[in-house]
Image (cartoon, grey):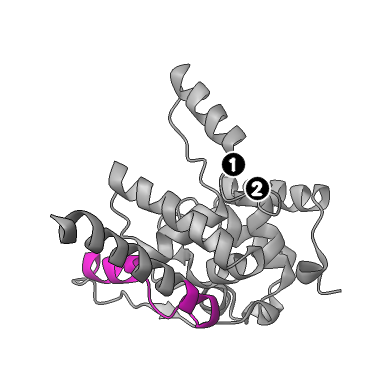
């Protein structure tokens, strides 16, 4: 009983902390989502996983700005959770609207790096736990760097470098604002949306993201000043 309720939980917590600390310094080359997608599309001969790690300095600042403007306007200010957006989403759902996501970039990063994509209350609890850890141990700059390297940006495309290469025939450091906004516009559903061949909705959404970029302030480590 002592092992089951004290030693084992403590060992798991210690392991998770060591895991997070190591990934503060080492690139994330593979994630549970990459493995899950490979299994999901194992019979699709045209499916290939494309992923190449790039440091934040080798990713266009426009990509950083685009995902913040699109996914998480308060990323630089919150502690990992946007409580206002969560409350707003719940309120809209109670009014009969479809329940929308209110996950921050920190939460999405924690989910992508440490957890399987399967939805459950247990996974949401673990997502919150790892979100707290990466906020405390990694900090905003590292969280954004990892997110821009592991986020699913198309079928088999993970991270900014893969998206830049296979969608726009360029590299992550050369992405323009328009290209970055098109990629960001596809993030909620990258398997059905295509930044290289955008629908009218994706183009409209990309333009809205571009306008929002001008309304937000970014620190020097994003602006590269």
> Is residue 179 in the magenta section?
no
140 and 72: which one is in front?
140
User: Where residue 168 appears, x then y in whole percent?
Assistant: 59, 74
Mark-to-mark CA distance, 1 and 2: 6 Å
Total count of labels:
2
User: Where residue 126 appears, x then y in whole percent?
Assistant: 36, 52
Quarter placement of the N terminus = bottom left
The quadrant holding residue 56 is bottom right
Q: Which residue does the image show at 34% across and 65% down from the upper left? A: 33
Q: Main secondary structure of the magenta part?
A: helix
Q: Tag on residue 67?
A: none
- Mark 2 surroundings within 10 Å by alpha-carbon count, few (fewer than 14), some (14 through 19), many (20 or more): some
Q: Which residue does the image show at 63% across and 47% down from the upper left? A: 205
Secondary structure found at label 1: loop
The quadrant holding residue 130 is bottom left
Q: Which residues are magenta?
A: 21-41
- Which residue is situated farthest in the front direction here? 2
Quarter placement of the C terminus = bottom right
- Which residue is situated farthest in the right direction here? 225
> Would you say the residues marked 1 and 2 are in contact, meaning their CB atoms lie under 8 Å apart?
yes
43 and 151: which one is in front?
151
Left or right: 93 as drawn, with respect to 200: left
Q: Which residue is mark 1?
A: 82
Q: Which residue does the image show at 55% across and 49% down from the upper left? A: 104
Secondary structure found at label 2: loop
Q: Which residue does the image show at 58% across and 82% down from the upper left? A: 54
- Residue 95 seen in this snapshot: yes
- Which residue is situated farthest in the top direction here? 95
- Residue 120 seen in this snapshot: no
User: Where residue 66 appears, x then y in whole percent?
Assistant: 68, 58
User: Where residue 4 appears, x then y in whole percent?
Assistant: 16, 57
Q: Which residue is mark 2?
A: 78
């Amino acid at each position: 009983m002592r092992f089951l309720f004290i030693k084992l939980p403590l060992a798991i917590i210690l392991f998770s902390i060591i895991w997070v600390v190591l990934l503060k310094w080492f690139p994330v080359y593979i994630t549970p989502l990459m493995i899950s997608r490979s299994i999901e599309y194992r019979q699709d001969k045209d499916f290939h996983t494309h992923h190449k790690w790039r440091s934040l300095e080798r990713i266009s600042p426009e990509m950083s700005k685009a995902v913040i403007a699109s996914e998480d306007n308060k990323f630089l200010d919150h502690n990992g959770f946007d409580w206002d957006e969560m409350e707003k989403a719940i309120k809209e759902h109670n009014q009969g609207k479809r329940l929308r996501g209110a996950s921050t970039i920190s939460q999405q990063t924690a989910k992508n790096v440490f957890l399987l994509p399967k939805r459950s209350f247990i996974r949401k609890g673990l997502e919150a736990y790892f979100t707290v850890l990466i906020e405390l141990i990694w900090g905003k700059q590292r969280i954004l760097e990892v997110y821009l390297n592991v986020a699913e940006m198309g079928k088999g495309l993970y991270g900014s470098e893969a998206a830049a290469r296979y969608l726009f025939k360029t590299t992550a450091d050369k992405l323009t604002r328009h290209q970055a906004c098109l990629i960001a516009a596809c993030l909620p559903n990258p398997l059905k949306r295509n930044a290289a061949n955008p629908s009218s909705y994706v183009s409209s959404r990309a333009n809205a993201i571009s306008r929002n970029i001008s309304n937000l302030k970014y620190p020097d480590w994003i602006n590269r000043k």
